Image (tube, rainbow, N blue to C red):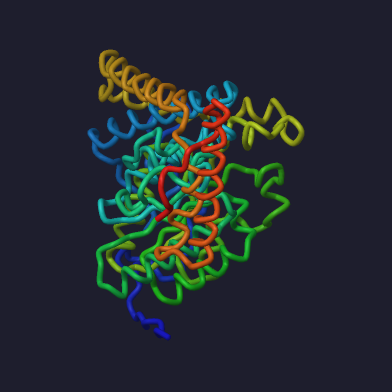
Amino acid sequence: MTTPTQHTSAPGLRFGISVEDYMLPARHTIALVDQAGQAIAHTDQGAEPGHEYPIPDDSHLLNAYQHLVVGRRINDQNSALVRQGRMAVYPSSHGQEACQVGAALCLGANDWMFPTYRDTVAVITRGVDPVQVMTSFRGDWHAGYDPQQYKVSAQSTPLTTQLLHAVGVAHAAKLRGEDTVVLAMCGDGATSEGDFHEALNFAAVFHLPVIFFVQNNGYAISVPLAHQSVAPSLAHKAVGYGMAGERVDGNDLVAVLAVLGRAVNLAREDSGPLLVEAITYRMQAHTNADDATRYRSDEEVAAWRAKDPVPRMRAYLKGRNILDDDGEQRIADRAEEIATQLRDGLNQDADINPLDLFSNVFERQTSQLAEQSALLADELSRDAAAARTAGTSAVVEPQGSAQ
């Protein structure tokens, strides 16, 4: 077994602070733009020595805002498609789009993202075709895109298992000497799972380039955070593993870009793993099958609606003359193009081949699966022949052997 590498230097020293101060998150949540879209004075940003963050450049902010608007439109369009019966389920990230966009835009071309089921906007922002992303939510396939092509893992429905996969990819990349940073995404509920501990501990001991990005939206389905943890913050959990932690306003896109951008740079410079907690809120229910009114009040939702990341970012960009009315219209038109693409793509019936059940289960098909595939192919052929004899075409014709 590979033994962990010993490290005598610490990234905290680069900022002129102690290792202990570097590992502890700032005492206040990092925020750069307030709810009204006004820049927060440097003295009020929640930053301390070693935790100061510069504002990203204007072009980066404008590009991020476009993805933010597109993300909101995607969330709302997908929620409508569920109501129309075109998708089985959709876990909306309406209200969390700043976290989603920041996660995707902080990564380089060779970096990997490991998303959860709620991170659809992040996956699309990473460059994956929107219709392909929604394939699994329609129940057609496990994932409609090639993870290797986009460096994006299939969205994980089992809670927290993707963190272990992320650590494995980071470990392999380090052994190969590859320039790869891995972003492992999860929610606050995932921090209560054993897999969370195992992933963080392994990443820290082996000094891996992994960023654990926790989107703390206050609830693990219906369980509030106060019933999961009494730590000062989820970011404080990092120090127990010997890694740095930071807490950011997850509805402040400027701050999310700054904090995650630095985290990626540090991981790439061999600082080891980092934990970033984003304080955010899902404005809609856990999924279309959830009744959120049973565990949270209208007043609570209204208070968070005032912190909506979209109007906050719009006001900030307009106040700095980075965004004008024409630019806003172009962005809105682009968002509508993608919504149309989703509607058109998901309104087409899938071409389903029952033999696909046996594809991609293993790289090399086992003898048992080959036998089962042959049995199904034979049954489909006999049913098709019987249907032709009866003068009907209701039975599916087999379309070749599974790979």
Asked which quadrant contains residue 42, the reply is top left
> Where does residue 214 sit, x and y in percent of width and height?
51, 51
Q: Quadrant of residue 38?
A: top left
x, y percentage for residue 106? 32, 48
Q: Quadrant of the N terminus?
A: bottom left
Task: From the viewer's side, name the closer residue of 366 and 20.
Answer: 366
Determine the residue positioned at 29% across, 57% down: 265
Q: Relative to 144, is 166 above or below?
A: below
Q: Quadrant of the C terminus?
A: bottom left
- Does the image show residue 198? yes
Picture residue at 48% right of the left edge, 58% below the top: 25
Q: Hey, which residue is sitting farthest right in the picture? A: 294
Of 13 and 190, nearer the camera is 190
For the point 32% across and 34% down, the residue is: 64
Q: Is residue 158 left or right of residue 207?
A: right
- Residue 152 appears at what percent x and percent y? 38, 50
Quadrant hosting residue 63: top left
The location of residue 282, given as percent across then percent down, is 57, 35
The residue positioned farthest toward the front in the image shown: 389
